[in-house]
Image (cartoon, rainbow, N blue to C red):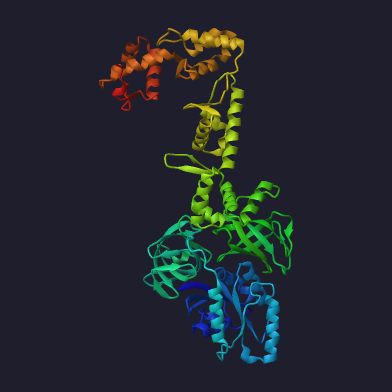
Amino acid sequence: MRDLILGTAGHIDHGKTALVRALTGVDTDRLPAEKQRGITIDLGFASMELGGVRLGLVDVPGHERFIRNMLAGASGFDLVMLVVAADDSVMPQTREHLELLRLLGLASGVVALTKCDLVSEDWLDLVTEDVIGLVAGSFLEGAPIIRTSSATGEGIAELRAALEAAANALPDRVQDRPFRMAIDRCFTVAGHGTVVTGTVVSGAVSVGDEVDWLPEGRRVRVRGLHRHDRPVDRVDRGSRAAINLAGVHHAEVRRGQELASPGFLRPSTVLSAMVRASEGAPRAIRHRARYRIHLGTAEVTGSVAVLDGPELAPGTEGLVQLFLGEPVVCEHGQPIVIREESPPWTLGGGRVIQPVASRVRRRDASGRDRLLRLAGPDAVARASSAMASYRLRPWTDLDLARDAGLSPAEAGTIVASLRDRGELVELPIGPRRSIRLPKASVDELEDRLIRAVGRLHGRNPRLSSVRRSSVLGELEDLKSDALISALVDRLARDGRLVAGERTVALAGYQPQLTQAERRVKAELLEAHKGTGFAPPLASELVEKAGARGGVVPELLELLAEEGLLVAIEPNALYLEADADSELRRRVIARLADGSTLAMADLRDLLGTTRKYAVPIGEYLDRIGLTVREGDLRRLSPSMGEADEPS
């Protein structure tokens, strides 16, 4: 059985509820105030089966004061039954409802003329002409117009047949999308707790599943399900569902919240959209003006930033950004309606093209181009633009599906294709974590990194390389040491950088030393030769160099980077490389049997003084050769027998 949602639309007192009762036997006016006043105030629900189609009926109020309720119900319509009373003909809310349905993207439906038993045949012909003129150019142009009477039963069978034909003509919707249901009602059931109702607009959910409750951001469990007032184990797209939620108090729930597959939707207060101002709107949609924004079953206030000028005049279309007073959840392609706060006029609507957005300045041409690609028909272009908008934030295929108007399967296929073509790069940022970036973004980051290393070379011309930590400082806005390290390693593999464990340099870079600095460098190396484990301190070398002492620290670091000296205590104490090798050999040999070494033992082992033994001991701990336990040191567990000298 195929599930679809049929909604009513039309002016107040045109017989929508009576027609639903004639079709289904259900009175959808459930509130005491509705019974007392004889008008529909809130949404009403019924169902019926027509051949192989199960229709969930949503009866909406026709009064202009309850447009917000009408929009909450209409957000899940698959097709509509526009109702026009034969004794009244086309009225203001008939026109507004039709415009709202157009803005919501409805594409199919039928027209029902009601109360036909109250007027003459000639009058019916005139009303029919009015209706034909009303729907001309709309999605209902050419739709069947059925003459009915709920009082006599006239035309009800023909209306059923027309609805069945319209339902069967609708194309099948994509079924492999995540579950979504916007909440339009909440109540409690004794012994069961909180129950929420809504229209399942995509996907499916089963008893026992966990779903995200949004924008609250809580994970909740589905305790029970009803579809069209019958208990079921699963509900699918196109169903009217009642969901019993575990661990949720009914006072916390309100219309406009949503239930969705875990990880699919993200709350946001900034959206980008492509909007068209209605032809008959009484005024333009103005830049920075505040409006009521209708999205799903939610109604929020917010300001509209028009990116294509000072306003959107009636009949024109353009890019906008919506800055909302409270968070909402939505996905790419979802309809929105924009209405004036007071008086409550409908000004226009359109489609969300960026469900989670950041501000785009009106003069930002690249930002506008990205939004235009998101609004376009090319799925790959939409996906690429969405990826670019993520910047350095990790994302999933579900995020891409939400933001580019794709199914998860389509998103996965596009990601795999872009990765295979080299247009999407995966960079490791942890043992089991990675970040995916468009190749253009990686190229931009790599260029920034190369320029940063070049700047550091310029500030330290005597050094053959610069410290990785210094590069991180140059690019601190990226806020990710792991990402920068991954980029350094990638550039090193490409031969554009030379990378060590703690250093990095431009490929082919040579230290910029003057003739005098080269002489000082040679003198520093000579001063360490043959000194064993009692070399001159850096401070002594600076003092000895006199006027040239300012370059000594950098030259000592350069000698360490070249592997001729080893920094025991950076900027303070260096050993000749051969002395460092002998140091390691002696310590391993001394501790290989599991014995320990006190500071005095280390001093005697090296034949030096405590002044040198203390920093050398700390150096051995730092490089992981020894482990300190109080005043004693033993060989690190990571040092195996293979490290023993022969």
Task: Name the foreground residue: 25 vs 189.
Answer: 25
- Residue at the (69%, 89%) spot, across then down: 123
Task: Name the foreground residue: 338 vs 644.
Answer: 644
- Residue at the (53%, 52%) spot, across then down: 400
In the rendered image, the quadrant that contains the N terminus is bottom left
- Residue at the (61%, 67%) spot, across then down: 105
Instruction: Indicate the position of residue 292 as horizontal and vertical percent values.
Output: 63, 64
Instruction: Indicate the position of residue 162 as horizontal and vertical percent values.
Output: 57, 80
Instruction: Indicate the position of residue 339 as horizontal and vertical percent values.
Output: 66, 66
Instruction: Indicate the position of residue 596 as horizontal and vertical percent values.
Output: 28, 20
Task: Name the foreground residue: 349 vs 505.
Answer: 505
Task: Name the foreground residue: 632 vs 552.
Answer: 552
Q: In this rendering, would 278 be left or right of 574?
A: right
- Residue at the (43%, 8%) spot, across then down: 531
In the rendered image, the quadrant that contains the C terminus is top left
Res. 316 in view:
yes
Res. 364 in view:
no
